[in-house]
Image (tube, rainbow, N blue to C red):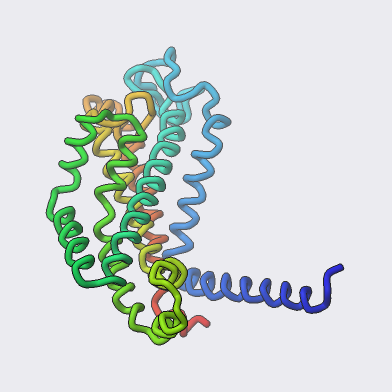
Amino acid sequence: MISETQLLATSTSHRRRFAGAQSFWRPFVASKMGPIGLGILIFVALVALFAPLIAPDGPFKLGGPRLAAPGTEGYLLGTDHLGRSMLAQLVYGARVSLVIGVVAAGISLIVGVMVGSLAGYYGGITDMILSRITDMFLIIPAFFLIIVVVATLGSGIIYVMIVIGLTAWPTSARLMRSQALSLRDRTFVQALRALGESSPKILVRHIIPNGIQPLIANASLDIASAILIEAGLSFIGLGDPNQATWGRMIFDGRTTITTAWWASVLPGVAIIITVLGFYLVGDGISYVLSPRNRKGNS
């Protein structure tokens, strides 16, 4: 049977979690822009999730009238130059954009946290070497490097995600380094050293968890950047040819923009709205992480 002490501990834990959620949600709502961005992203995510229900025939089905205008019977958003449904391509393109954005940003965050925390916590020669590597990646034009790598290795979605992620980490590394430099001399870290806690454990259990907050806000910007980069790669023909992507749609519709604007304008609007959603969420998270705003909304 569960003792009264265990029940009390469980209740206290639940109250702390609820209080923690409230301390984040209240200033996030107060930021005004954050909830708008979150609403946009929820809508895009639901569209991507239910793409097979919205467009059961998939994005590549042919046979429709070529360049049918939006509102044509059976084609809510019209068709492209091959008679494919614009709606189907847009909803499946949302899947590709979100997956690439989230995975690429995740890779960037992991690499940035590892490099930045090691450089900031250990300092010395470790900091010098890792900082020079970070600077080297910062001065290389990332988009052109991505073009070279994708053109060499292939344009599959896996390659695109990995390459974007491995070129976007320096900003996260710099943020994490500054956090680690600030945290390594704090009293609680010195106390842990005095108690015999090993450096790797201090780094993983205390430095990274306490210093990762600014990187979370930056991650939303990394997702938006990855979506834009993937759209650019698809536009110049280096995206995955087996996937319906918004960049490829803009490329295919560029020649008919004066007579069939929807073929390129609609995917462009989809990119703008999705990227705007991530930027607004990032703005809301930054507002939450501001000590002044957290104090004012507590």
Residue 221, quarter of picture: bottom left
Residue located at (29% from left, 50% from top): 225
Q: Which residue is situated farthest in the top direction here?
A: 63
Relative height, residue 194 to residue 83 (above, below): below
Q: Residue at image x 46%, y 69%? A: 205
Q: Is residue 143 above or below residue 35?
A: above
Closer to us: 119 or 251: 119
Q: What residue do we see at 42% from left, 84% from top?
A: 194
Where is residue 102? Give x, y as percent: 41, 48
Q: Residue furthest right?
A: 1
Which picture quadrant has residue 240? top left
From the viewer's perspective, tell me whether residue 235 is left or right of residue 193.
left
**Residue 234 percent location from the top left of the image:** 27, 33
Check the image and name the residue furthest to the bottom: 187
Looking at the picture, does residue 10 appear above or below residue 140? Answer: below
Q: In which quadrant will I find the N terminus?
A: bottom right
- Quarter where residue 203 is shown: bottom left
Residue beneath the point at 68% across and 71% down: 14
Q: Is residue 32 at all visible to an observer of this figure? A: no
Along the viewing direction, whichever of 89 and 214 lies nearer the viewer: 214
Can I make out residue 189 in this image? yes
Q: How many marks?
A: 0
Report x, y in % for residue 247.
30, 35
- Camera-nearest residue between 81 and 71: 81
Find residue 198 and report its horizontal and vertical position in percent.
42, 72
